[in-house]
Amino acid sequence: MAEMLQVSEPVRPRQPPQWRAFLELGFRPLYLAGCFWAAFSVALWVYAPNMLTGIMPGVLWHAHEMLWAFIATIAVGFLLTAAATWTGINPLSGPLLGALGSLWIVARVGYLLPGMPAFTIAACSELALFVWAAAALGNAIYRTRSRRNYGVPLLVLALGVTDALYLFALLDGDYLLLLQRFNTGLLCMAVIALLVARRVIPFFAMRAIPGLTIPMHTRSGQWQIGAGVIAVICSLLQFHVALAIALAVAGVLALVQVRAWKPWAVRRAPLLWILYTGYGALGAGLLVAAARSADWVGHEAWPAHVIGVAGFSVLIIGMVTRTALGHLERPLQTDNAMVASYALVIAAAALRLIALLPTALSLAALHAAATAWILAFVLCLWRFFPMMIRPRADKSPTSPISSILR
């Protein structure tokens, strides 16, 4: 009789991979592409530089791929997904999203191949990606009159413009101009990161921590974005004093915001403290960039690595985890692999900055940083790839997009 009264929950079979699910929202293919390229491109640059046979020399290829192929790709994936939430219109899905991903693949392969034709095809594919993504975002945002997001398509288009300027400077052989164009692209990306992170981090924190109330800093955020846009313009025009002031304002505001968000309250929530850490590092990186613009810091590589590795990359590993879990309707909890990837990215950032110091440990620190970095993103891929290629467990693959927006 006891056996007859036992009730067991049915075991839900694991759903098979589906192209339709994979191409449902922008974060699925573009998060995976960006994380894969983060690991693979660093492995090439550090451990197999002889394979970099394209027009771009090794360090210039590395800088380009980190900013426009890794960081910007993750940003575009996030914005395409977020715009669906903001507007109720999915900017790109299905074959069109697949075509956007194909442009990304063509660009990555083309930059690795020797010869001007391959470079030209890669550049055209990459610039088409940014223009197309900006147009798709604009279509969703402007059609629905989402006024607070009117600047987002323009910022994505600015990423494409700075990419084009970088590539033209490369072909001209003007490496001082090329560095300035890279820094301008970095600042465009910083404006996007500040805009997005300042909105979502307080929301995520208050939703996760019972009783936590923190300010959204809407007014300071507007000043911050204004300072960031001014910094981008001053970088293009090479107004160094004004650039330093604008960067300092944006950086100080970021640090003030993260302090006001009560970081001690999220110390036991990895999904939150990783975002706080990345945002704080981004603010610190903007101050380093201000010091460099004022000629207080001599090494050109410091701003790029503090902003890019300690800031963007730490934010990315946290944002990929949090937003992917949320949109896939998974529990908003980290496991050991996720936390290990966080620790590895932070370690990679610290070691990469140590490698910039003129010491006998520089080369060893560089290799250690590369190894930690590669392991971090391989772990992230290992954890999320099976989820990204399958339908959400709670939704039919035929569900309309409006029913799956968070």
Image (tube, rainbow, N blue to C red):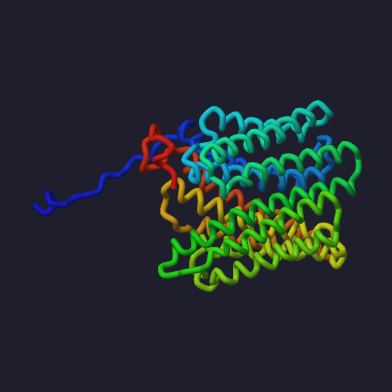
The answer to whether residue 36 is seen in the rendering is no
* Residue at image coords 69%, 50%: 189
Residue 314 location, x and y as percent? Answer: 63, 58
Q: Nearer the viewer, residue 250 or 307?
A: 250
The vertical placement of 289 against 97, above or below, is below
Q: Position of residue 352 (x, y in %)?
A: 74, 60
In percent of width and height, residue 104 lies at: 66, 35
Q: Quadrant of residue 341?
A: bottom right
Residue at the image position 86 percent from the left and 53 percent from the top: 238
Horizontal side of 324 relative to 133 (left or right) equals left
Residue name at image x 82 percent, y 36 percent: 53
Please state which of residues 49 and 250 is positioned toward the viewer in this rendering.
250
Furthest residue in direction left, as rendered = 1
Residue 253 point in image, percent of width and height? 66, 66
Going by the image, does 69 lie left or right of 356? left
Is 28 on the left or on the right of 162, as rendered? left
